[in-house]
Amino acid sequence: MARKPRRDLTIDEQLARGPLDLPFFMLVLLLTGVGFIMMFSASYASALYSVKADPFYYARRQILFVALGVVAMYIISKMNYRYFKPLAPMAIFVSEILLLLVFTPLGRSNYDARRWLNLGPLTFQPSEVAKVAVILYFAARLSRDPEPLKRYSRRTYTGTFLNWLQDLGIMELVPYGAVLLAVLIPVVFEPHMSGTILIIIGAAAVLFVGGIPIKWFLLGGGLMAAGLWFIITNTDYMTARINLWKDPWIDPLNDGYQTIQSLLAIASGGLFGLGLGKSIQKHDYLPEPENDFVFSIVVEELGFVGGVFVLILFALLILRGYWLALHARDKFGTLTVVGIITLLAAQVFLNIGVVTNLIPNTGIPLPFFSSGGTALMIHLGEMGIVLSVSRQIPAPKND
């Protein structure tokens, strides 16, 4: 049987087969490994004391998602990230549908918030998908070839007004504002303030690097701050969290209990910690230590030194991510990586801020550490996109 002639690879296909960035890849694997160990250590007591009476319950689920997430990350890293560009509008459409499905019988409520969606065996927060979709859409639109300004008829007052808005640059921002508003409205009504903040941060990072004038950030930031303040001060759910942040001891046995126990765990860790697996607070003192407050157990068991080590790993990953963004092949790659890495940095800061009571409780998990399979897979998928961009970074020229 005659062998088919080999098809020559296109330039895009050749570039997509380049080596992935090994330092970034190894940092992701290291954080995932350390995160799993600490999640297992933090969860086995609560799993043992639960109705399942199985200390390995959370660990078995998490290791499955770790394996699936790492495989998914590697598969995505082998894909040409430029293929995501035309799919960005579809990603926005799908994320919007998922956000709206939360308000149907498929949605699930927990702690007075309706943020979760049950699709068969999967339970996840659609806002996690929306964060990535907004970044991809904004990056795709900002990386298009510039179009000539559309001029309207000057014979009408409407045309004159629209031309004036065009000259100011406002019309350029309308598509971004419309998409962002469409995504944020259902997230706000869940209510999911932390998800709202993260979506805004990711979108703002892409817009800023994409070249949107700083004056619009000052104006938009002021309006967003005013809107958030209005929501916080006029929503019982958020007002209670602000009051507990100021003084968790006003309700030490109920809503302030978790924050107090988190601070006690951090304080008892000292310089070198109590030892891996030897936490006291995870034994039914700190509620759900395997979730948002897993870093408290990290510091209690590994001490100040262990906590700083974890933060250094995150810092190295974030810095390496920004380095990859600076050296990306094109603007779409740069903007996509900036959005994803800024989102990661914001999640780490907000989570650590909550467990140390630096900021009010936001309900944001610590990436790679907190229990939750679908969230972990989404994080690893995002890292796969960054690695896909890294494959096409031009090789340094030898002088």
Image: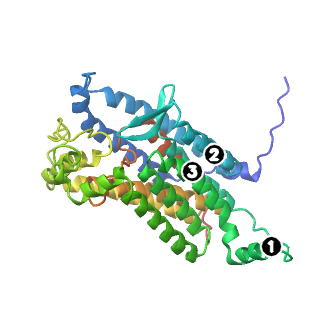
Disc 1 and disc 2: Cα gap in Å?
A: 33 Å
Amino acid type shown at disc 3: Val
Q: Is residue 272 left or right of residue 99?
A: left
Label 2, on which residue? Answer: 91
Q: In this view, does 217 lie to the left or right of 245?
A: right
Give the secondary structure at mark 1: helix
Task: Judge depth for marks 1 and 2 and give the one in front.
Answer: 1
Q: Of callouts 1 and 3, which one flags the residue occurring earlier in the amino acid sequence?
A: 1
Amino acid type shown at disc 1: Gly
Q: Is residue 185 left or right of residue 167?
A: left
Give the secondary structure at mark 2: helix
Label ID, residue 137: none
Label ID, residue 183: 3
Task: Judge depth for marks 2 and 3 and give the one in front.
Answer: 3
Disc 2 and disc 3: Cα gap in Å?
A: 12 Å
- Residue 382: x and y in percent read 52, 48
Camera-side residue: 381 or 172? Answer: 172
- Residue 113: x and y in percent read 40, 42
Give the secondary structure at mark 3: helix
Q: Of callouts 1 and 2, which one flags the residue occurring earlier in the amino acid sequence?
A: 2
Camera-side residue: 246 or 289? Answer: 246
Image position of 164 with respect to 127: above or below: below
